[in-house]
Amino acid sequence: MVETRMSDATLSVIAHFDVRRRRVLAADGTLVGPRPDVAVNALTSLYRAMVLTRTFDLKAVSLQRTGRLGTYAVSLGQEAVSAGVASAMQQEDVLLPSYRDNGMLLWRGVKMEEILLYWGGDERGNRTSGPAHDFPFCVPVGSQAPHAAGVAYALKFRKEPRVAVCLLGDGATSKGDVYEAMNFAGVHKLPLVFVVNNNQWAISVPLKLQTACATLAQKAIAAGFEGEQVDGNDVIAVRAAAEEAIAAARGGKGPRLIEALTYRLGDHTTADDAARYRPPEEVQAHWKEEPIARLRAYLVSQQAWSKAEEEQLAAECQSQVEAAVERYLATPAREPASMFDHLYARLPDVYAAQRDEIGGASHG
Amino acid sequence: MAEVTLVEAVNLALARAMQEDPNVIVLGEDVGINGGVFRATVGLQKRFGPERVLDTPLAELLISGLCVGMAAQGLKPVGEIQFMGFIYPCIDQLVNHASRLRNRTQGRLSCPMVLRAPCGAGIRAPEHHSEHTEAMLAHIPGLRVVIPSSPERAYGLLLAAIRDPDPVVFLEPTRLYRSAKAEVEDNGEALPLDVAFVLREGKDVTIVSWGAILKETLAAADALAGDGISAEVIDLATLKPYDEKTILASVAKTGRCVIVHEAVRTGGFGGEIAALIAERALASLLAPIARVTGYDTVIPLPRLEQHYMPSVGRIAAAARRVCQFA
C-alpha cells in the first residue's frame, strides 16, 4: 500500500478513492483466491492461444534475425493480456491495439501471414481478415486513445451495445493523448475499456521514471471512473477483469481502466538490445512469473492438461506458424504504382502523372 | 435570396449538411449553446441536439483524434478548432492518422472528417490568433486543404468538404467572416473541390491567391486596370490537391505570374506554384515570377500587423514590375 496524505489533518476529506488489485493464480499456478466462473475448457483455449502467440512471436524474431522480416515488436511475457482481454470481447466490439498486441489480433481472426506482411513492409497486412471495424496496429504511442473515444462515442450515439477496447503500454500513460481521451470518456460515460499493459519498460525508461504514481490504474480516477490493477501474468484474473469491465461498458455504466501488470521479457523490438539498460538478473527473476507456465501448472494440477496434449499443441502451433510463414514469404510485393491506390477514395487527377511516372519507371 | 456574411454561410452549410445526413456531427470547444467563438455553429445545438452538436473538453488534440475515431465508425464529424494558432496539437492526428488511415488499411477503414479552423490576421486579435500556416498542412499526403474567400464558396466548398469521403482541413479567413457579404442560395449545392476559381479574367498578368488577401488582390487588379494592365485573378481555393491546369492555362495566356499569400514566404505555398510554373510553363514566361507574401517574421501583434500583410500597393507594384520587365 502506498499512501499519500496532505500534511494538514485538520482539513476535511472531501473525496476518497481505492485502487484494487486482482489476482487468482500465484506464480506457481496455485489458486490464491476463488476462481472466477470460467470453464476449464475456456481456460485450455486461452492456454492454446497463449502458446500460439509465443510460438508466432519467436518465429517472427527469427525471421527478422535472418533478414526475412522488418523490425518486430515481440510480446514475450504478455500473452495473458492478449488472450485474457481478446477472449472477453465480442466480434462486433472494436479493438484499438498498440503495436505489441499480436495475440489480440490473432484471437480476433487476423491471420499470422497478415501480421508478418505488415512487419515485413506491406500495407496489405493491415487489410486483415479480422473484424473490418478493428483498428490496425498503432505505432505513435498512445495516439489511438482519442480514436477509441471517438469510436465509443459513435457506438453510444447509435445506441449499439458494443464496446471499444483500447490497448496501451505504460509509456503511453505519460502522454496527453491518453489523458484527453480518458477525460472525455469519463464525461460521456462512453462504452470504452482502456487496458494498460504495464510491462514496466518503455524501451529503456523504467516505470519509476515514467510516473510517480503508485499504480497506473489510479490514472482513471482523475478522469472520473474506476481503474483496477490486475496481475497481467495471470490470464484468469485478466479475463475476469476484462469481462467485468466490458460488461459494465456494454451495460451503459461507462469506461473502466485495467492496468495489467506484466514484464517485458523481450527487447522492446528487434531493433533494441535491452542488455544495455537492464540487468539480466532482473529479466531472469521475472521469468519465474511468466503467464504460460503459470496457467499450465494450474491446468496440470486440475488434471486438465497432459504431457501428450502439450506435445501435440507445440507441434500444431509450430506447423501453423510454419505454414503462415510460407504464405507470407510467397506473397509478392504489390505493384509500385499501387502506392497511390488508397491515398484518396478517388485519386485526384493532378497525381495521376506521378503514378504513371512510377509505372513507367519500372525496371523489374 | 438573402445576403449573408461568410460566417453565416458556414452556418448555413453546416445546418444543411446536418439536415441531409444524420451522421454529420459537429464538435469543438464552445460550439454548443454559445454557437462557437465566431458564431459559426449558432443555433445548431438547439436544432439538432447536444449529441450531434457537442461541446468538447478544452483539448484540441482530442477533437482531431475523436474525429478520426468517429469517422472510422461511419460518422461524418466536423470538428472546430477555435483559431488556427491552436491547430498544432492536431498535427500528429492529421499526419499520422487522418490522412493515412485509408492508405494504411488499404481501404478497409477511411476517415471522412472535416476540421474547420479560422485563419489569418487583420482582426486585431491577441497573440496566436492570426496564424496562416496552411503550407504545413498542404504538405501532408492524403489530406485536402481548402480555403474559401467568399460566402458562396464558403457555403459550397464546406458542403463539398463534408460530403467528401476523405479528410479535409477547412480554413476560414477570419477577416472575411463578417466583412464579406453576398447573396447565397441555401440550395444544398456544393462547389467542386480541387478546382481553382477564376475571379477575374485578364490577359497581361496572372495573380494567384487564396483566402482573405484576395480582397486586396482584387483591389490591386482594379488599380492595375486604371493603368491599362489587365490582371487575371485566380482563387486557388483548394491548396491540396491544387488545380495545376487552371494556373498553367492562365500563365500560358498572360506570360506573367504574381503569387500573393498572407503566410510567410519561405516554405510558403507560393513557392510550390512558382516551381510548377518553372517546371511546366517556363517557355510561356515573359518575366520572372513574383511573390507578394507576409514577411519571414513572426506575425506581429495588432499594432504592426497591417505592415506585415501584403497590401494593395505591394501587390499592384509587383504586378507592374512584372509587366514592365523587358
Image (cartoon, coloured by chain):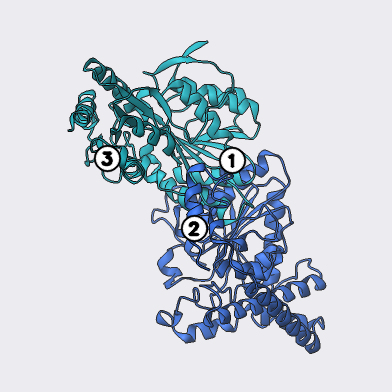
Chain colours: A blue, B cyan
| Residue drawn at (41%, 44%) of the image | B137
Q: Dot 1, crowdedness within 10 Å: few (<14), some or many (≥20)?
A: some
Q: Which of marks 1 and 3 is nearer the N terminus?
A: 1
Disc number lying in front (1 or 2): 2
Type of amino acid under label 2: Ile
Considering every residue shown, the one lying at the far top of the view is B1
Residue type at mark 1?
Pro
Q: Which residue carries the number 2 mark? A: A358
Badge 3 amino acid: Val
Circle 1 residue: B165
User: In which quarter of the view is residue B159 placed?
Assistant: top right
The residue at 64%/35% (across/down) is B23
| Distance between the alpha carbons at the discs numbered 1 and 2 | 26 Å
- Viewer can see residue A24: yes
Q: Is mark 3 on a helix, strand or loop?
A: strand
Which of discs 2 and 3 lies nearer the camera? The answer is 2
**Left or right of A262 on screen, residue B252:** left
Please state the chain letter of the residue tagged with numbered disc 2 in the rendered image: A
Marker disc for residue A306: none
Do tags 1 and 3 sit on the same chain? yes
| Residue B204 horizontal/vertical position (percent) | 28, 26
Give the chain of mark 3.
B
* Gap between marks 1 and 3 measured at Cα: 31 Å
Name the image quarter holding residue B129: top left
Q: In which quarter of the image is residue B148?
A: top left
Q: Which mark is residue B264?
A: 3
Q: Nearer the viewer, residue A229 or A133?
A: A133
